[in-house]
Image (cartoon, rainbow, N blue to C red):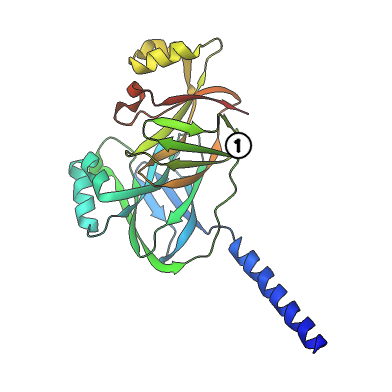
Amino acid sequence: MRVAAVVLAAVLVALGVAAAVSAQAPAPTVRIQASESSLNVGVSGPLAAGPTRFEVVNTGGDDLEITIAALRPGITLAQATDALRSDPESAIELVHIDGGVSLTANQETRAVTFDLRPNSTYVVLNLTGDDPGDWEIVELAVSGQSNGASVPGADARVRIVDLRFRGAKTLPRRGVVRFENDGWAPHFAFAAKLRKGARKREVAFALRNDRNRRLERLVNFERSTEPQALITRGAVNYNEVRFPGRGRYVMVCFFENHHRQGMYRFVRVR
């Protein structure tokens, strides 16, 4: 009896260890290759739901804007595509923008991890360029099966609550930052380094009043990045960030002039 009990305990421990290892499996990676005029998503067949890492590779040395969105129930790919071509702002109402990345011409790769919704149709959108008629769209199917993966650990966490950034005021120069949109509107986060001697109140005044020339004297837009692409309510992203350098930054949401309403925050990058 004692031997049987020992064997049973060993089996239960082994099963527990196996379950723990399985629960901590890293998110699978989907590789997206894109340029200003091309979009290739390396997926064959439906994806499992759950945490998924999207790595965007800049194949053309262009500024890129990649968005990954789930169609809302009852919305077809044709409807979303027509809206995107004719009125991009109205297309936002047809999808859940769950993630995305923005790359500058000198960035080779960027990656973001977020949860894929089960039993959903997703679209990967290459929104690079000014003409919506030229934007590329690739469809992705997500099954009801879970991939059993875990999200990566975060070096800092930022909450977006209505028209404010909350949470960490210190961000890693290179690391993972968790952004969560708890607000009612779509938001993104653009971060630019403050010039030496720039005062916060001067930067705030320039932002609220669209004093662009003054802002350029205070903020170095050549030393900037977009740590969080546009996401809608409820989205949680784990962004692999690379800031241009350490120092003081202002983090801003320019979507629909949110900056005029005070949607900016001063952070330090270390």
Is residue 134 shown left or right of residue 18? left
Q: Nearer the viewer, residue 115 or 57?
A: 115
Instruction: Report x, y in % for residue 92.
Output: 27, 44
Q: Quadrant of the C terminus?
A: top right
Q: Quadrant of the N terminus?
A: bottom right
Residue under numbered circle 1: 174
The residue lying at 33 percent from left, 14 percent from top is 209
Q: Is residue 5 above or below residue 134?
A: below
Instruction: Report x, y in % for residue 124.
Output: 36, 51
The residue lying at 54 percent from left, 61 percent from top is 149
Query: Dot 1 lies on which element?
Result: strand
The residue lying at 38 percent from left, 23 percent from top is 262
Q: Is residue 149 above or below residue 89?
A: below
Q: Is residue 62 visible?
A: no
Is residue 233 shown left or right of residue 59? left
Instruction: Report x, y in % for residue 103.
Output: 45, 37
Instruction: Report x, y in % for residue 44.
Output: 42, 66
| Three-letter amino acid code of the residue under disc 1 | Arg
Q: Nearer the viewer, residue 252 or 123?
A: 252
Residue sticking out furthest to the right = 2
Residue sticking out furthest to the front = 1
- The part of the image, by quadrant, that contains residue 155 is top right
Q: Is residue 99 visible?
A: yes
Q: Nearer the viewer, residue 161 or 267?
A: 161
Badge 1: few (under 14), some or many (20 or more) residues near its Cα, within 10 Å?
Answer: some
